[in-house]
Structure formats: structure tokens, C-alpha cells
Amino acid sequence: MSNESKSELNAAFLAPFLIETVEVFEVQASTNVSAGKVYTIDASESLTGDISGVVGIVSDHFMGSIIISFPEETFLEVMSKMLRSPQTVIDKKIIDGAGELTNMIFARAKTTLNSKGMNLKSALPGIILGKGHHFFVAKGVRRTVVPFDSDAGKFSVEILLSNESAVSEANSRRMKILVVDDSEVIRTMITNDISQMGEFEIHQAADGQIALQKIQESIEARAIFDLVFLDWNMPGLDGINVLKSVRANKLLDKCYVTMLTAEGEASNVKIAKDIGVNYYLNKPFNRKKLQIFLEHFLEVMKKI
């Protein structure tokens, strides 16, 4: 991988962690923070801290960790702000604060990255306690460090990645969505709303025949649609017959199909479910309903 590609990768992958670090500290700990210049260190080098929160980064193709390391005085000041009372010693009452802050940052960054197809999985936070402790990692692990300054003191966020080329591949792949509806207004509304909820590759089809053509093209390109919004009532080939064609093709088993329709009768719902629809979104719907569905869909995709 070229240095330029690595730089682009770091920017795309690190950005959510930087953004969420600022957000979490400001909201949860009433602490204003600012990021310094990002740099990398060799696996043989080490950072020090007095207390650190650690969360594993796990995906299908790479592994790593996010580590937030505090000097004692910074951590005590942050905890004093969180608890709204002076903290003068790192004891059992407050040590889990390091893990909790790290976990919040990871969870929020994970949501952003998974909307781009990264498929990061949840992991349990841990805490390392010890004056001036060091981190050493295996050879080949890329270590990226972000120093932070704050009105509570200095601290650092470190991202460890074991397979950067796999991160680059995952980061470059956005989930593919096909919106099928004979109403241009509905297609545009869904496309605009979904685009504001994450980085997706969105295609449109005005009828069932065009939808099947686009789906076939995605098969031939080995880039099958992850999600299809499918209108029930369309002129020519309707949504139910498109659904039948999709479910008849084993190559499309992982294609998630959501039926869009005003046909909310129980009998129609049963028909669609029997054929193999994954979700039923009744018209009319608004952006909030789309957001709730998309969050559900992303959770389902994590388990596939």
C-alpha cells in the first residue's frame, strides 16, 4: 500500500474516533478537548500512561484496539468533572471511568464506520492501571497515535490495526442499496434521507423490469445489492413478482428486501413473508421510520 493510500485510510478510519472523542468528553465529562497532530510509532516503541481504557476492534478481516491513556492528574480531573465532586485518588470507585469513556467513543465511532460497510463488532472494554505503564505490541501492527489537549490535561488515543490492507478494502466498500418505486418523489425522498444517514451507494429503478436488470448487472459485477427497497404496486412487473425472482436465485440469498407499500392488510403481509421478504415498511413513512429501519438493518448485517 502506498504512503498516500495509507494516509487516506487513516483519515477515513480515524475521523470518527477523533470526532467522537471530542463529543464524548464534552457531553459526558464537561471537558473541552482538541486533537493534536496525528503520528505513527513503531511496534517496538511504547507509550506510557497511569490508567488506560482498552477496547478491541474486531471485524471479519482485521483486528486491533483503541486505547485511551491518561496521566493520573488528567484522569482525576476528568472524573471530578464527570462526578461533579473532587477526586484525589484513583480507586475502585472511579477506575471503570476509563473503560466507560473508551467504550462510548468506540461504540459511537463503530456506528459511523459500519454505515460505510466496515462491519465492526462489539467488544468488551478493559482497564490497565499502573503508574507509568507501557504498551508493547507484536511486530507488523500499525500504531497510530492522536495526542489530545484539554482543560483537564493531556491524554492520548491510540489505534492499533493488525491488517491495514484489509481495513482499506473494507473502508472502500460502501453498502449497495437499490430503491425500486414507480414514484420519482418516493425514490428521491428515500435516496436523500438515506444519504444523510451514512455513506451508501444508492441506485434507483422506476419499475420491476429495470430493477431486475440492475440486480442481474450487480450479480455479473460480483457486487450484489445489500438492500432493496421494493414497491408493491407498480405498472408492468410488480414488487411481488420481483421478490419471487430475487428469492428464486440462490446468489441473492443475502440480499435484504424491504417491501414498501400501502397494502397493510394481514393477508398481503403474509403473502410477502411467505415469498421471503425481510421487512415490511408501510406507506406513509417519514425520515424517522427510515432511520429506525436502517438501524435495524445494520444490526442484522453485523450478524451475517
Image (spheres, rainbow, N blue to C red):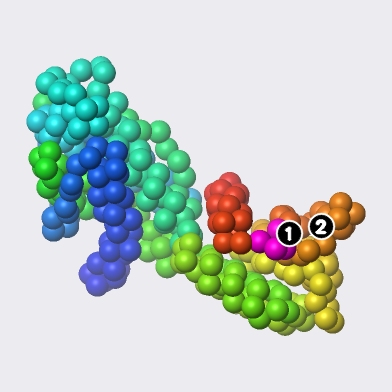
Mark sitting earlier along the chain (2/1): 2
Magenta region: 281-285
Q: Is residue 50 left or right of residue 258?
A: left
Residue placed at 35% from the left, 40% from the top?
Answer: 104
Residue placed at 77% from the left, 78% from the top?
Answer: 208
Q: Which residue is mark 1?
A: 282
The image quadrant of residue 19 is bottom left
Residue 283 within the magenta-colored segment of the rendering: yes
Q: Is residue 8 left or right of residue 261?
A: left
Residue 293 within the magenta-colored segment of the rendering: no
Residue placed at 81% from the left, 57% from the top?
Answer: 264
CB atoms of marks 2 and 1 within 8 Å: yes
Query: Residue 210 placed where, x, y %?
Result: 72, 82
The crowding category of the residue bearing disc 2, from other C-alpha atoms within 10 Å (few below 14, some 14 to 19, many at least 20), is few
Q: Which residue is mark 2?
A: 264
Residue placed at 42% from the left, 56% from the top?
Answer: 113
